[in-house]
Image: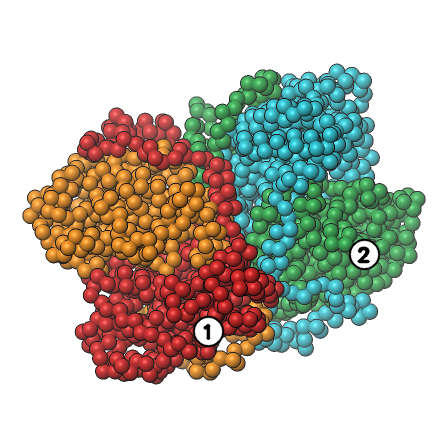
Chain colours: A orange, B green, C red, D cyan
Amino acid sequence: MLIFEQSRTGRGNGAQKIKSGATLSALPKQFLREAPPLLPEVSEMQAVRHYTRLSQKNFSIDTQFYPLGSCTMKHNPRACNRLAMLPEFLSQHPLSPVSATQGFLASLYDLQEILKGVTGMKGVSLTPMAGAQGELAGIAMIRAYHESRGDIERNELLVPDAAHGTNPATGVMCGYKVREIPTRADGDVDLEALRDAVGPQTAAIMLTNPSTLGVFDRKIAEISQAVHDAGGLLYYDGANLNAILGKVRPGDMGFDVVHINLHKTFSTPHGGGGPGSGPVGVSERLLPFLPVPVVARKEDQYHWLSEKDCPDSIGRLSAFMGNAGVLLRAYIYSRLLGREGMVRVAEYATLNANYMATKLAEAGFDLAYPKRRATHEFSLTLKKQAKEIGATATDFAKRLLDYGYHAPTVYFPLLVAECMLIEPTETEAKSDLDGFIEAMKKILSEASSDLDKLRAAPYTLPVKRLDEVRAARELDLVWKPVVAGE
Amino acid sequence: MLIFEQSRTGRGNGAQKIKSGATLSALPKQFLREAPPLLPEVSEMQAVRHYTRLSQKNFSIDTQFYPLGSCTMKHNPRACNRLAMLPEFLSQHPLSPVSATQGFLASLYDLQEILKGVTGMKGVSLTPMAGAQGELAGIAMIRAYHESRGDIERNELLVPDAAHGTNPATGVMCGYKVREIPTRADGDVDLEALRDAVGPQTAAIMLTNPSTLGVFDRKIAEISQAVHDAGGLLYYDGANLNAILGKVRPGDMGFDVVHINLHKTFSTPHGGGGPGSGPVGVSERLLPFLPVPVVARKEDQYHWLSEKDCPDSIGRLSAFMGNAGVLLRAYIYSRLLGREGMVRVAEYATLNANYMATKLAEAGFDLAYPKRRATHEFSLTLKKQAKEIGATATDFAKRLLDYGYHAPTVYFPLLVAECMLIEPTETEAKSDLDGFIEAMKKILSEASSDLDKLRAAPYTLPVKRLDEVRAARELDLVWKPVVAGE
Amino acid sequence: MPFIPHTEDDVKEMLAAIGAPSIESLFDEIPAALRTGGLATIPEGLNELGVTQLMQARAKKNKPLLCFAGAGAYEHHIPAAVWELTTRGEFYTAYTPYQAEASQGTLQLLYEYQTMMASLTGLDVSNASLYDGASALAEAILMAVRCNRKSKSRRILLPTTVHPAYRKVSRNIVSNQDIILEEIPYCAEKGAVLAKSLDRYQGEDIAALVIQQPNFFGSLEEVDALTDWAHAQGAIVIAVVNPMTLAVLKPPGEWGTSGVDIACGEGQPLGIPLAGGGPYFGFMCCKQKQVRQLPGRIVGRTVDLDGKEGFTLTLQAREQHIRRSKATSNICTNQGLMTTAATIYLSLLGPTGLRSVAQACFANTQKLVERLAQIEGVEAIFSGTHFHEVMIQLPCSAEAVHEKLCEQGILGGYEPSGEYPELGDALLVCATETRTDEEIEHFAVQLETIIKNLN
Amino acid sequence: MPFIPHTEDDVKEMLAAIGAPSIESLFDEIPAALRTGGLATIPEGLNELGVTQLMQARAKKNKPLLCFAGAGAYEHHIPAAVWELTTRGEFYTAYTPYQAEASQGTLQLLYEYQTMMASLTGLDVSNASLYDGASALAEAILMAVRCNRKSKSRRILLPTTVHPAYRKVSRNIVSNQDIILEEIPYCAEKGAVLAKSLDRYQGEDIAALVIQQPNFFGSLEEVDALTDWAHAQGAIVIAVVNPMTLAVLKPPGEWGTSGVDIACGEGQPLGIPLAGGGPYFGFMCCKQKQVRQLPGRIVGRTVDLDGKEGFTLTLQAREQHIRRSKATSNICTNQGLMTTAATIYLSLLGPTGLRSVAQACFANTQKLVERLAQIEGVEAIFSGTHFHEVMIQLPCSAEAVHEKLCEQGILGGYEPSGEYPELGDALLVCATETRTDEEIEHFAVQLETIIKNLN
Ligand SMILES: Cc1ncc(COP(=O)(O)O)c(C=O)c1O
Ligand SMILES: Cc1ncc(COP(=O)(O)O)c(C=O)c1O
């Protein structure tokens, strides 16, 4: 039942009514609203009950194994939330002067330093509010860099076909043409094709390494050289940074710009879709273009650098300081892990992924790149199952829900047919991996024995399989009250 | 699965490991433990997931209508929790000097005053930790009072047969013999029987008014006079105080002592069984005996009264100050309600109960006291259903769970056969009452059409009907690891 | 190990299954030459106790200020239930609801959110959030350019009464797409844009006009006239609004004769703590006919195999993960949790609660300005109708006053000299429903003293 | 109306259904003569904003102190997850799990709790909590008297090394049942009871002996000898223990040759905030053979109709709601939520985490005492082995020192002159794992200065 369907006109929640004795008679009528907005009129208990029950209808990391490839659904330590919500942080107005916010600024400054350390970059700006905004900042910096050198003919961005959709979308937002680079059968970028594509029109290449296929591109040095030789720059999409923490740094691989999804590698909670945070790091030559604000230190005092201090900056990307509270959470997480803990993230995430890949291959599933090491994630192709039995990646995904496991990412990357991209993360125990593997085996046998059943899964969730086609065709995006007599 | 079954030896949760570099070598070995205790070894995520999922297996006020008679399961406003958990309150050591705890003391003092106001008593002590400890304090004060006057032959306590089990149990703990007084067919205490029972041996009578039958004893003035005339005192069990807030006060009815269940009338959360809080209020003549500590005010400063200040006190009943945090929650609640809000509690709780009683009677259920007004609760007797169809109060209770409603109190009070004691509280909306009534009707028809199905309910909960007899016969109270080879 | 559940035995078994000699060997595809020496600059790990002590010490270095600042972020009372529910693990630690059947909680909530926002703005549909108010305006401008097929100019009129940071952010985000943001001035007396001042654009090709209501100065714009003017020019109208004020102010969907086309803004006033500037959330609503140009996620109601009501992400073909370079925006992760809080906030307040907040904000700022105006040399700069923010003139250095107020524990407002030098010494002040009469008096007394001492 | 969902229409419909003219008429069975005039002394209602402002102001009137006090309540680090989970509505707002099928969350958790407590104490079974440590001792004494069928004396030996408040509370609770609590002295040098000092009770009818370990002074008692002595006398042995210390100290179930009969104590160290003294929780464990005398609720594992594992309250025939005047205790509502927190706390710490806390407490107090002993005239009073609390001697008025320390923001410990005048000027100090080296040094420096100024 929707909250609106529990609403009754004239029911007030007195505890939230502010008594001001004020009227708005001073306001000319033309500015005023006539009919009240359609907001529910419920008691506090009705609201609490409604949203508590709704929450119970979600899968989440706190309740299920959630091996969503490239999304890095790992444990969100509770201390990060608790400490980022200390009253002194929550009550800080964004325009408070630096003299009153030294504790907050010190934390952001330290985070900048830590991110420099793990990426091997020379400067970091924390302001982008998600990975995609980090990309926007990064590509805008690349553009500003070329323009600052008068190198204005570069109008093309190279993007491997395995790239996340945000990469090409960002390119276009920054005014670039996007050119796709194919991937070889072994999962590495097709270096020949890249060499053919690269040229004086190349502004940059956007790469994820390990890629979203779940393999580490072994030719990264050659790629870097090819692009740099042509005067282009290298952009690192940090969505998979968790795979290589402390093992290899984007800076050492030759990248000029990197964004980091703090909501992935630094385990800030995904919140049912956000907020995230996408700090950007840059090499020396791009330093002047970093988006503001950035935190600087002078002796023991911290202060903001803004447009005035950074005249070449691509400027600000949010009204204030990006997703500050997410930054605090990431900072706390990074201190909980420390240097040893960060390396362990890469190590155990990789161990878990390789274990699952091996076991699932043994169970009869096809790895998309069977000859390769898995990184922190790996892709299966269910092409065989789809063709031979008629069970698609969607069917497996939906049925997994019945077994109490969230489905992996499906149909991404697009170049792997019937793809399942599986990322177990370092925080899952072997026993949970084994449980998932068992479920996959069972579903495989169900697929042979009772395909119809599989195709109608799930059965144990609040709803059965939803009609997504209808959702898009008969758009129903807001609730409307049933008018009496209709 | 139990948390122990997820444990693996050697798994450490590093985030909770304190590095002290210390050993216990300074401690003689005879003081030391040899084998480590059987505590689970799980990661933070495993613990979070386990207890989150466990929580989802509970019915609660936040998720269900929970009309448990006499237990007053009403909405627990979230501000009470949030504000009682402000860091300055949580971090206060109980032995902190009054100079450092004025905010805390002021709140307790105000609460004492508010409780005096609603009960009509002359003094209040907040220290008892639940209703039953309030009873113990109250009866101990009555005993101390009689003894202080040299009136030492009084060894009997009168308790109506409808009384809660804590009443007679408390009497015995205070060294009294307990004598039951019968209830008349109309629900009032049998005044004749009382007059026969009362005498020089009578220390006091313990009464709940409205009683746990869901009726207000109209002869309360006569009862009071009869007991007082014989030199006995009147104890008010305040579990149902919510029914009469602002309508009639125990003090005005002639009671000498009262306890208040803050976790009922003042809506502090029940927490799956506690904590509660059971402050006691007394009339003038019992003031010297109040348990300590009590908060006093001198000009604008608050301080504790302890044994030294109150030489006749029955003393302290807890190591420190009872359930202080519960007291803060009750205080916050009382300020949210205020005087008008308190009267409304009684009014709307009574409206809801009378509405349900009427509707259920119309639906074919028998009210235990059909000629009486319901108070904030009322009792049904399912004698007819049990006898004619074979469906017991238990069956109805279990089946209600399937309909998403917590069962009312069943088989209490004992004097009503197949009793269901229903207390909807003021915070439930008419639509939820109607839903419950509908469910009761459906179950009634199910009882006739498919008794077997009813008798095996519930079906939709994490477990089916549990074998309670086996639980008591084959005691399994702690988990034991399966030793390899067994 | 913190947060890693593996025992030594687990590791051994797993490596054996993989057939790898060590964890290290799993990284053997990384060219040795690139391998990192270590993370020397990263501090060692702390346990939770240590981090708690660290962050509590940091928190103490933040000095709480009595807040009379708004300028895009407002201190409002947030009912305790809002964050107790929002931080429930099932909301807090879920991902984007791609698997609809396993995400009905988040999805239904977002559908409710969309309904509330559409109703507040008086428009037909809402997306499920953007990053913040400023970037939402940038997205609205991009959307307007996409929607306005008739206009070829890519020219947007952007009054300087729009939040300065929003204008900058919009510029930074849209400028690489050859879009022209043309700033238009305000009336120095009213602190708002005069419709007649737009006469000079009459007949020109304008893609869109942006109107902020209440504007950055807290003044009310002539939204009806401005909207009608723009529509007459064939321009799209973008409203930037504070959703709290929409409890009482005319919703953008009703501005002028046909209402605006797009409304966007900052959702922070709806139950989101100030928190140093974020996370907040941007919202965007539009008319039904333009829904396919709306950026960001959208939830729709549908049915399951049994015909039972359910919710799912829909119109995903607008989004980057499907449409890639042709998407309406590159946004992926949005501000989901913040909309969760806002939805719960709005449910707890309801229409009357929200209205009472708006009224109290209006009344308190009124009181504040009246009280401050009693101080010699202090007065409201603009004569127009204001809502819950007012630009006041000071008789001495605003920067100095602002600093001294902070020393006294008061955040005295927003000091506009950087962005609006024409205003001289001024402060943009604000008193929401959380400010008491005593606090207003305290502010006034402090301000009076400071001015005296400075003069 | 706050928290009441009724609309005017609802009220009308409901009254019509009842057939009553008004809500007021529903109270017509209350004799008019008794009716309350009103609640004049109760303040008017505040909205949530108002109450928030009130309580925040109250909180600010509480002055935080750097805590070196224990004496029955200890500042420990509480992992953030503990209370985030404990305050989930489904735990927080559930009732006693009388309907087992609808309460499996709470019930399974309690079964886990019982297992943990039984293991920590080394005994067979545990109840599901009592009010607090002090009242748990009172209940243990009552239980011992019930269990010890051979003893007719109702005489309990209660060393004065047992927490003074526990002794008082026990007296207040049990004294109406003709039970005699006989206090026995401690060795002035060791700060503990000497087993040989009990020789004078040899052969007497003693129902039970109470032993607190570590005792109130933080000293370790000769628990083996004391237990064996008591058992030889036919007395029941009751242990009062701090469960945190049982990570490293010998569990009561292993004291002497056959272990104690009953162990009880205060659960606060297991994840419960200090909170001005409560709510905390009492625990009680005993041997299997005495489980039917155990007061309070007990959860058992059983099966459902399908044979599936499930949990339910059991042995309810001991309890007041069934057995009424013959119940083992009058306790009904207990401290359920606190045991929820403790169970989660213990799960997060595990055996090694809890051990590390115990070790750090031991080490920090050791450090503290060594550092304080460098101050002229300050030294540990007792020579016995102490755990994480120590009674120190001061060279000047302890009361004055305590007060001055508070003025400096330090809670310097428990000042024992009221309860133990024989100790002269003394302080019982404690440094848990939460105290840093800097804080210990700060305490020492302040103490030194204060002593200098007082002398
Ligand atoms: C590989 C990759 N790149 C970029 C992104 C975009 O990041 P965000 O969602 O934080 O905007 C994602 C997010 O899923 C991703 O997986
Ligand atoms: C009528 C009555 N009296 C006394 C009590 C005992 O109160 P408590 O559970 O707080 O100890 C109860 C609790 O259920 C009750 O309903």
Residue B395 picture location, percent across and down: 56, 54
Q: Residue at x 24, y 63 (%)?
A: C175
Residue B453 against residue C53 in the figure, above or below: below
Numbered circle sitting on residue C381: 1
Image quadrant assignment for residue B252:
bottom right
Q: Residue at x 54, y 32 (%)?
A: D438
Number of other residues with Cα within 10 Å of mark 2, as a class: few under 14, some 14 to 19, many 20 or more: some
Q: CA distance from mark 1 to mark 2?
A: 59 Å
Note whether residue A176 is visible: yes
- Residue A45 placement, left or right of A304: right
Residue A276 picture location, percent across and down: 35, 52
Amino acid found under the numbered disc labelled 2: Lys
- Residue C396 placement, left or right of D149: left
Looking at this rendering, what residue extends furthest in the front direction? C455
- Residue D437 placement, left or right of A102: right
Amino acid found under the numbered disc labelled 1: Ile
Residue A195 picture location, percent across and down: 8, 45
* Residue bearing the label numbered 2: B122
Dot 1 falls on a residue whose secondary structure is loop
Q: Residue at x 50, y 34 (%)?
A: D349
Marks 1, 2: nearer the viewer: 1
Task: Tell which of D48 and D455 is nearer to you.
Answer: D455
Image quadrant assignment for residue A107:
top left
Dot 2 falls on a residue whose secondary structure is loop
Task: Tell which of B432 and B399 is nearer to you.
Answer: B432
Residue C156 picture location, percent across and down: 26, 72
